Amino acid sequence: MIRLARRPAPSRVMLWGSPLVAVALTFALGAAAFAAMGQPPLGALHALFVSPLSDLNGVAELLLKASPLCLIALGLAVGFRSNVWNIGAEGQMYIGAVFATGLAIHFQERWGVWMLPAMIVAGIAGGLAWAAIVAALRAHLHASEILVSLMLTYVAALIVKYLVFGPWQDPAANNFPFTVSFEDNALFTLLANYLGALEGTRLNTSVLLTLAAIPLAWVFMKYSFAGFQLRVAGDAPAAARYAGHSEKRAIWIALLIGGAAAGLAGVTEVAGPIGQLNDRWTPGYGFTAIIVAALGRLHPAGIAVASLLMALLYIGGETAQVALQLPRAIAYVFQGLLLMLLLACEVLVNFRLQWTASIRSSQAA
Amino acid sequence: MDRFDPLIASGIAAAIPLVYAALGELIAERAGVLNLGVEGMMLVGALAAFATVAVGGGVTIALGAAMLAGIAAAAAFAVLTLTLQANQVAAGLALTILGTGVSAFLGRGYVGFRAPASFEDLPIPWLSALPVIGPLFSLNALGYAAIAMLALTAWFLFHTRTGLALRAVGESPAVAHALGLRVTRIRYAATLFGGAMAGVAGCYYAVAQFKMWQEGLTAGNGWIALALVVFAAWRPWRTALGALLFGGVTGFGLYLQAAGVQVSPFVLGSLPYLATIAALVAVSASPQLLRRHAPAALGKPFFEGD
Amino acid sequence: MPTTSPTLLRLDGIVKRYPTVTALDGVRLDVAEGEIHAVLGENGAGKSTLMKAIYGVVQPDGGTIEWRGAPVRISDPVAARELGIAMVFQHFALFESLTVAENIALALPGSFGLADLAGRIVEVSRRYGLPVNPWRSVHELSVGERQRAEIVRCLLQSPRLLIMDEPTSVLTPQAVEQLFETLRALAREGTAILYVSHKLDEIRRLCDRATILRGGRNAGEVDPRAESEAHLAERMIGRSFPKTQKRAHARGAPALRVSELSLPPDGPFGVALHSIRLEVHRGEVLGIAGISGNGQAELLAAVSGERRVSPTEVCLSETPVGHLDAGERRRLGLAYVPEERLGRGAVPGMSLAENALLTASRKGMVRAGLVDWPAAEAYAARCIREFDVRVGGPHESGTGGASATAARSLSGGNLQKFIVGRELVQQPGVMVLAQPTWGVDVAASALIRQRILDLAAAGVAILVVSEDLGEILEVCDRVAVMAGGRLSPVREVSDTDAAEIGAWMAGGFLQ
């Protein structure tokens, strides 16, 4: 019989090895599932996850999808390290997009080059505002941040629907739920404008924001005293109180950073590849980012890699629709499976497997 | 009086699945297991039920299939958290993501069809004609069973040795283990029961209330059920009260629409979520109350091998 | 008498290994029917692990157990109870939110009827002089009542062997006498008792035989009544008992003052404080004795700043600080060693360097909001060096040196030395320590107590809150007792004795 035995100290090998094992197992299970459905397993995996990356455009699309995932996950990781479970990043992203869209469609001509910076600030403010509701209710009224942040996501989705079906609807849209398209000054510039080699891709300058956020998050987590205090609050709340760290402050910081990152991600989408606000512009980045954060071990470098992988699953899902006539939901199946397997593999960080047969035999009968 | 009957009836209809899901979660949480995967378990249960009637099965078989699907989903969660010591919050989220994805993926062929068989209302003569409380006596089989389930759960928790052991495990697994209670076994059973009840709730949506399948059919009600458990301070009868309040909010919206009042459907749609937040805040603002009733070991892993 | 009675329980070659330590290494133990048998050893000697192995909570990795001459395997506590083994746990195995009757029902086989059971509880508690109300919730009970509830639970099983794990650490000296009477009565009726303790005087008064454990191995079997305390101590720790050196010193100005501190309970299981007044002067050690759960935790929270109170209720050198948080009070020269080491005094999963940063951050470790990790490592290294902190085995020494070791992997004594060191190196003006040597081995205890005395000699005001009366009498200049959320008058240690303090622990000063 196999049983678990606690390791004296967490295994460093398994800390980073378990995500790799989980990814490998996910693809193996995926291959088995394709085989069961009568598809050649390796061929299907190749069609989904390799061929989309065979050209520059494919790689650009991957980065474009990974960017918001990475941004949100960096923000969430800060909160998760302090045991604050903001699972409503999706809603915070919606509100960020709504705030930015409000500027883009109401002040279009007047603000010139200041339009996009103003939208970025507004988007961050939107994410902050939505997260602040959660923080206030959690820090001061002790309501579960998990449930409140999720409930607010449903509300945020309805706000977006209300706007795009109502006051913000493009009059020329024949009752389709979207706003007018943003003017150029309300959009991130295509990188192709600066770098000829990227001609034809949709990559834009918002990717640079994400690239800047990665080292920033790393410094915050590794070197800032605030980041240390958040970790203490998560690992041992009693120790945080003993040291005199404010619990409320930790909750506020954790949620606000997540909200700001999600709000910013909302701007990069509506002012990026989408170019307008509609009622189904996100494939659930806010939820997928939770998996990205976990898969990346709440470490900025890990999160960057994990965001690429999860973006690949999205692209695979889209390809599956076209190439294999499979529904897009297959991406979510893979995502859920991956997170489950990751959690299962994580047991090896703190435990090792032990065969108990030898022990029983040496014991009194 | 008659004008309010539809309001009450739709309120009760919305409350029944919440009662099932919340009771299941309540039992799991009383044993110390916080399973945030209720929404995911409900969705796979709903799909299993709908698929059963779609291929010609009866509603009873559909109910069984839904419970089995819920149990299977809960079993995955239980293995992760109880055997492999995974974080319960993360595992619950994973279960919801996976359940949402799997049900959407496997259910793609059923979208747009009406359920060929469903649970129908079984009005009790005379009683169902009473004003105000009449709707309570024209429920379908799952509705009546929900009332029985409430009584059964309350009796089990507070009047049986196993119920006592379950509460003990939720308060201190270490002490329970030292006394020889099978902590992991009890937690497994409680978690699987939660899965079965979530499956029933899903079945209710698919083949009793909406009589159809679509992606995300349960619309966040699994999360509302989780909030209900907190609102009820982990006491069975209070979940029924809470569920009726939530159902009432939903019913009120429908009532306004029926009465011709101009209210944005988006405002109406957000009412249950806002009501959930309000209810959570209302009970959480008094930490004394929650600390007194919350299972002390809720969400904390216990490893028997130490 | 023990030599003529048949053997009830015989353990041989019992081994229990944990990832970092071998807790039991070939232990032998014989218990005869009707004898009171002591298991003696210092903290970490393996006493509790051995008892848990007998009660089936822990499965040994090797060795044999014989019960009345036949080999048995005790797979879990249910099996142990079926054999006739019952156990009273050191920290009580009771569920706070359940009633006494419900708690007892969980351990008894047979039909489930609480009313019937309550009758039997009352009957047994009358017979043995152990009054306990079956319908009360455990969280309403005093510590003594809880222990009685546990003993009644055991007696209802009509055990042949009753294990008592450190039962007197929570009792007043007077209550200890009562307990001994009960145990002697049980032994006369034929119940064997395994009495686990590190208190030599108790064992000499109560027990017929003693098995001594040291470092997980047998270190002899003796008749404790025929041995001197010093001799028993030497066999227990393997060398002569270290003695602390107390130096005479002058009492200075008051440095910590608590005035008229009253607090409502902070939770359903909390204790209210009633107008507490105390003053600690520079250069003195003030002790607060008393049984845990009488308001010590609440007083400590209010003094340390974990719980804020009104400004003047707590003063540091005339500065009102009641409204400040723990960090702000630390800046004013307060240091605090809490009772709970893992999870409060230190973050288990974090390295010693990170744990140094936890309370000593203002000692040059943070600049412009950023952490200077080399400074934190140097600070941790200094604590490790100056306080003789032994950090794990060779497999622990990673790239970051000793300061990279996780707090979790240290033994209780070494972690406590580190925490005390971390607070002392900050050169506080006022030092508060809760249970400074609870669960700590003798050598580490001696070091910590000596450092407390040295610190007082250097002019620091020290407040020690401890359940261990011996410790209080050893290190303190003045002593007060907490009972029921109130503080007794303060006495010079030289003007009082264990009997008076014991009476006060039971609330005697309130009349």
Image (cartoon, helix red, strand yellow):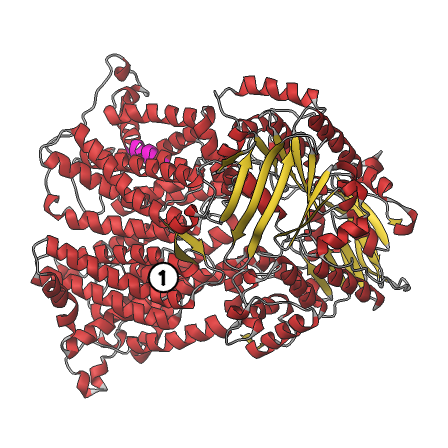
Task: Name which residue type carries label 1.
Answer: Ala
Classify residue B216 as left or right of residue B295.
left
Q: Is residue B255 above or below residue A268?
A: above
**Residue at the (59%, 57%) spot, across then down:** C342
Q: Is residue B135 above or below residue B25?
A: above
- SS at mark 1 in the image: helix
Q: Position of residue A20 (x, y in %)?
A: 30, 66
**Residue at the (24%, 37%) spot, across then down:** B68
Asked if residue C76 shows in the view, the reply is: yes
Q: Where is residue B159 in the image (x, y as percent from the top left)?
A: 46, 23
**Figure quadrant of residue A191:** bottom left
Subunit bearing disc 1: A
Quarter of the image where the C terminus of chain A is located: top left
Q: Mark 1 points at which residue?
A: A294
Viewer-proximal residue, C89 or B46? C89
Viewer-proximal residue, A165 or C21? C21
Magenta range is B14-22
Q: How crowded is mark 1: few (under 14 residues within 10 Å), some or many (20 or more)?
A: many
Classify residue B229 as left or right of residue B98.
right
Asked if residue A103 shows in the view, the reply is: no
Classify residue C466 as left or right of residue A306.
right
Viewer-proximal residue, A364 or C344? A364
**Figure quadrant of residue C194:** top right
Q: Please tell me whether the stretch drawn in magenta is mainly helix, strand or loop.
A: helix
Whether B256 is among the magenta residues is: no
Whether B19 is among the magenta residues is: yes
Viewer-proximal residue, B176 or C244? C244
